[in-house]
Image (cartoon, rainbow, N blue to C red):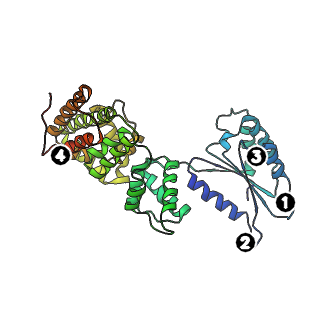
Amino acid sequence: MTQIHLVVGDNETEKERVLRELARAASPKGGPEPEIIRYRAGDSAIETVISDASTPNLFGTTSFIIITECQNLRSEALEALAVYFKAPSPTTILICEGASIGKKLGKDHPFTRALKESKKFITLVECPSPPDYKMHEWASETSRSRYKRSLNEDAARLLIECTGTNQSRITSELEKLDIVLNPGMEIGEKEIREYTGGAGEKQPWDLAPAVARKEIDSALGILANLFEFNTPALQMLYALNTHFAGLLRLKIYFSNQRELLAQTKKLARMGFRGKDEFNRLMAEAIKESRFSERPLPPNMIYARIVLPRLLDQLDNYSLDQLTYILRYLATIDVNLKTGLFKGGLIDMERVILSIMYSDKHRMETIL
């Protein structure tokens, strides 16, 4: 077995699996388990780590040393490691784990040269984060491997919608669910909505997509959260106005290109198989319609378009409705600034319900 393993990347679940496999491989079948010593980069002197790695185990077994968070190792520490890399102990398995290791070093740095000169002793294992469109699969695997809980695809997608694609946030929510649920209980959509849907502080931008999807429970929950964290009504109105103005521009764009809209919807239904072409068409539509202030790169389409189900939002409102909604929001904005609209929780609840039911009920506007 190779004496040195560099396990790099930001996929924590995959790195944990790799570390378990390496520890298992270091223990011969039927033989004694290896002694495992953990150090965290920055907390321990690198000289101590190298000394322990170089010293044979008193019981004659393999020592298994892990240095975590190696992205925090300074240049001089990496230089000291480079010396060990050239002549590693045959009775020690050294694992350096981190988001990256020595990535910013020049090609003439001793550590960089040691990686090239000591290849026979070193194995590089890369564990990059999954792309956004596969993050729900990562969440399901993390739930199963780390918490021994089943998380079906629909529940996993809902979790990503609630938390975003930040792995630390996803793991934090799974840990919370593991604490509050009975042992072995499956995590379903009901549990996600009850314990995660309203987790943490929401932002005004979270409100608009829920309103546009006509999800009353979700929109009212986000609204209550915004008021709980003292978010001004003016910020909520600004977010609603910006979002629905973008929807109107996108609706006009697609209304002039109906065949393109049909093609885009077909690609959306194809999922992963149509992902690349869908991303390209949507990125172009976002740019040409000026849906957002800045063009979206294709790798952002999943988080900004697919997860919030933007095409469904478009289907929920006609051009006439979207035009009215913008006039209505402008009226509310003026009334808020002149004191005619108080902007309390109940007032804002009426606003979002008026938007959702704008096909049946309309108020007089100033425009």
Per the model, the C-alpha gap separating discs 1 and 2 is: 19 Å
285 lies above or below 270? above
The image's mark for residue 57 is 1
Provide residue 134's location: percent of width, then percent of height: 44, 52
Distance from the alpha carbon under mark 4 to that under mark 2: 67 Å
Q: Residues within 10 Å of mark 1 (few under 14, many from 20)?
A: some
Number of callouts: 4
The answer for how far apart the CA atoms under marks 4 and 3 are is 68 Å
Q: Secondary structure at mark 1?
A: loop
Alpha carbon of mark 3 to alpha carbon of mark 1: how far? 23 Å
Instruction: Please identify the quadrant where the N terminus is shown.
Output: bottom right
- The kind of residue tagged 1 is Asn
Of the two numbered discs 4 and 2 on the same chain, state the one appearing first in sequence: 2
Find numbered disc 2 in the image and state the secondary structure of the residue it sits on: loop
| Residue 277 shows in this picture | no
Q: Secondary structure at mark 4?
A: loop
- The residue that disc 3 covers is 118
From the viewer's perspective, is the residue at label 4 or at label 3 nearer? 4
Which is nearer the N-term, disc 1 or disc 2?
2
Mark 1 or 4: the one toward you? 4
- From where the camera sits, is residue 35 visible? yes
Three-letter residue code for mark 3: Ser
Cβ atoms under marks 3 and 2 closer than 8 Å: no
Q: Which mark is residue 357?
A: 4
- Is label 3 or label 2 in front? 2
Where is mark 2, residue-wise? Answer: 29
The mark lying in front, picked from 4 and 2, is 4
Tell whether 113 sits left or right of 165: right
Q: Is residue 314 left or right of residue 8?
A: left
